[in-house]
Image: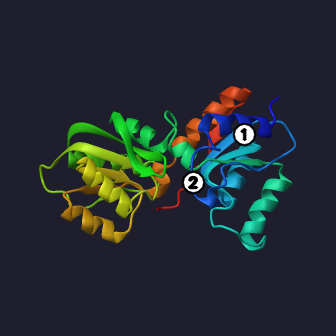
Amino acid sequence: MTAAADLAASADTLLRCREIPDYAPALNGLQVGNRAPVRRIAAAVDCSLRTIQGAIDAGANLLVVHHGLFWSGLQPLTGAHLERVRLLLTHDVALYAAHLPLDAHETMGNSLLLAQALGLTPNGGFARYQTIFCGVQGTADIETAALVAACDRFASTHGGRALASSVTPGRRTRRWGIVTGAGINADTLREAQDLGLDTVITGEGPHWSAVDAEEKGLVIVYAGHYATETLGVQALAAWMAEQSDVPWSFVATPTGL
């Protein structure tokens, strides 16, 4: 019989939550406590009314997410935000969030797991944020169109699709980088160019990134913010379930993005 607080403390240590830098609204760790021992764990990408209800319907009383309850910053306890909190408290469901500490983890990181799902082997870090790498990089010799198709197949399993910036016929990917979610920005593109990458796989990005990528000789594959961040929380929930000897399940709530 494991308490959510004890399991959360173990996960904090595993993910080095107190050491890994992150955005303030991430609030990594146990965001909402509960009273009963953990009987089942649910994993989800986002903390929303749909995911909380999905955890309750699955019989879980610990919900593990990538984007937590406070992702939108400080806000009053009214409207939908209040209903999320009310639902968690009424059903005694604990909430644990792990953002960049999960992205940066050496075995559970979203980018690492996505690379493995696509048949790619990482050999280094990519997408530096302060003292950590949020993504991975590696080498390959694969037709870029085939890599885009593999990303699309992956995205389609999570209610999305993959789109790519300009891909010329016969183009091959030899040096790639992956950073999941909304990992593309000016710094990331500059880093990709400095590293000599020719292809970057991410979740989503601004329109200008596709324009700049073409002029830098890069192809960016946008495989969906939601889809690319489904893997880490599942790995973490599975680890927590093993530690506490309880079952776990994934609550699928695709956003279409």
Q: Residue at x 63, y 49 (%)?
A: 65
Q: Residues within 10 Å of mark 2 (few under 14, many from 20)?
A: some
Q: Give the labeled residue for mark 1.
A: 8
| Quarter of the figure that contains the N terminus | top right
Residue 99 point in image, percent of width and height: 58, 50
Judge whether residue 235 can be spotted in this image: yes
Q: Residue at x 61, y 39 (%)?
A: 16
Residue at disc 1, secondary structure: helix
Residue 243 point in image, percent of width and height: 69, 27
Residue at disc 2, secondary structure: loop
In the displayed structure, 176 sits above or below 89; it is above
Judge whether residue 158 can be spotted in this image: no
Q: Mark 2 or mark 1, which is nearer the start of the sequence?
A: 1
Estimate the spatial distance between the alpha carbons at disc 1 and disc 2, rounded to whole Å.
18 Å
Q: Residue at x 72, y 71 (%)?
A: 75
Q: Is residue 104 left or right of residue 216?
A: right
Quarter of image, res 238: top right
- 1 and 2 marks in contact (CB < 8 Å): no
Mark toward the viewer: 1 or 2: 2
Kind of residue at disc 2: Asp
Q: Give the labeled residue for mark 2.
A: 22
Kind of residue at disc 1: Ala
Q: Is residue 16 left or right of residue 115?
A: right
